[in-house]
Image (cartoon, rainbow, N blue to C red):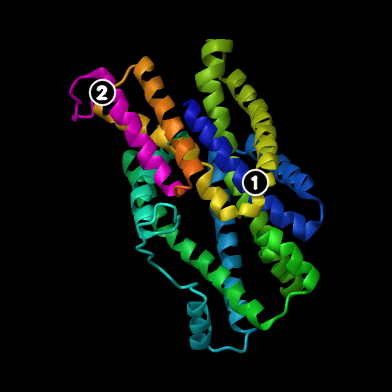
Amino acid sequence: MYLGLLLTIINSAVKLLAASLVLDVITGWGLSGSALFVVAVSVLWSALAGVKTVIWTDFLLFGLFSAGAVFVVVFVAFNVEQSFTMALTQLDDQAKLVLFDFSLDPTRSYTIWASVIGGIALNVAQGSTQGTWQRVRACRSVGDAQKAYNYAALFYLMHLVILAVGLSLVVFYTEHQIPADIAAQLKSAPDRIFPYFIISEIPVGLSGLFIAAIFAAAISTLDSALAESSDLSVIHIYAKYVRLAASETHYVFVSRLLMGFWGLVFFGVAMFFGRYSAEGLLDLTFKLPNYVYGAIFGSIVLARIGIGRLATILVGFAVACGLVVWMSQAGIAFFYWCPVSGLAMVFVVCALERRQPDWSGTA
């Protein structure tokens, strides 16, 4: 539970940082001001709205975000002189269209081996977090939950649209010169290229659609995380150790107060991560959660085979954390951290327990 809460904090802080960087460029409010605004609206919306309202709002906001991404690709297509074939040739010359990297170098992050090996472990770990199960519990039946999982997988196609946006910007700025002062700023903060494109190229009026889309993406991410963190805090901490057997109304009231607390936590951690934004938000998004994904992955496997006591699991957890630190210092690609540290945790706990695993899954 505590690992899941820590994972939620890391993920939410990185996403808040991403949205705040964009809003800062557009509004000029500063990174902290933009982040506080996003947090305030997210907390207010999460506290006032019910689960059904949040779900439908998230769906509508996702549609708005998707429409904005598609519009960028179409807009660039009509505002460059290159043909589609010429654009593809240019991108290929810059190695922007490389789909598969079969390099065995463990320090390379985006290889086919890192994505397959790390991706399997990451999906197992992520699929068992509180946020996932919170969504499952909101479904009316097991069948509805299975449909939700299946249909959610289809929306991974949206990642291809986001990649197309990035490629479109490469083609666009090959023909359109970026001012020297802006280019200097982008060297230290390359993730600001998209908001710069919005405010400098998109026609007035339509640019509001993109501001709304970015803001929508931030809120739809944070409102779920706030509800998740509040739910964990009330059920596993407050109701167990602070106020036992209180009324449902009291717990709902406390959960809303805790949303404000966790919003401030997300804000503080996002500002801390902002010191490392020069690494690139994509790397931060993948890298930071991998510090704890391995322990979560190991815990899930141990629970599945029915092995482990608190003492042995803590030893395995310490080994997993030590391995992550070592791999980080050694420059090992972060996609390998989860499977390596998680499996090491499993092997250590199994060795200490010295009993046969229960493969039935009912232990």
Say which quadrant the C terminus sits in: top left
Tell me, yes or no, whether the highlighted magenta stretch contains residue 113: no
Spatial CA distance of label 1 from label 2 is 41 Å
Q: Residue at x 78, y 72 (%)?
A: 180
**Numbered range of the magenta stretch:** 334-363
Q: Label 2: which residue?
A: 351
Q: Residues within 10 Å of mark 2 (few under 14, many from 20)?
A: few
Query: Which label sits on residue 16?
Result: 1
Q: Earlier in the sequence, mark 1 or mark 2?
A: 1
* In front of the other: 303 or 323: 323
Q: Residue at x 71, y 46 (%)?
A: 38
Tell me, yes or no, whether the highlighted magenta stretch contains residue 356: yes
Q: Which corner quadrant of the image does residue 304 belong to?
A: top left
Answer above or below: position of 263 versus 314.
below
Q: Residue at x 79, y 57 (%)?
A: 27
Q: Residue furthest front?
A: 330
Residue 345 in view of the camera: yes
* In front of the other: 267 or 293: 293
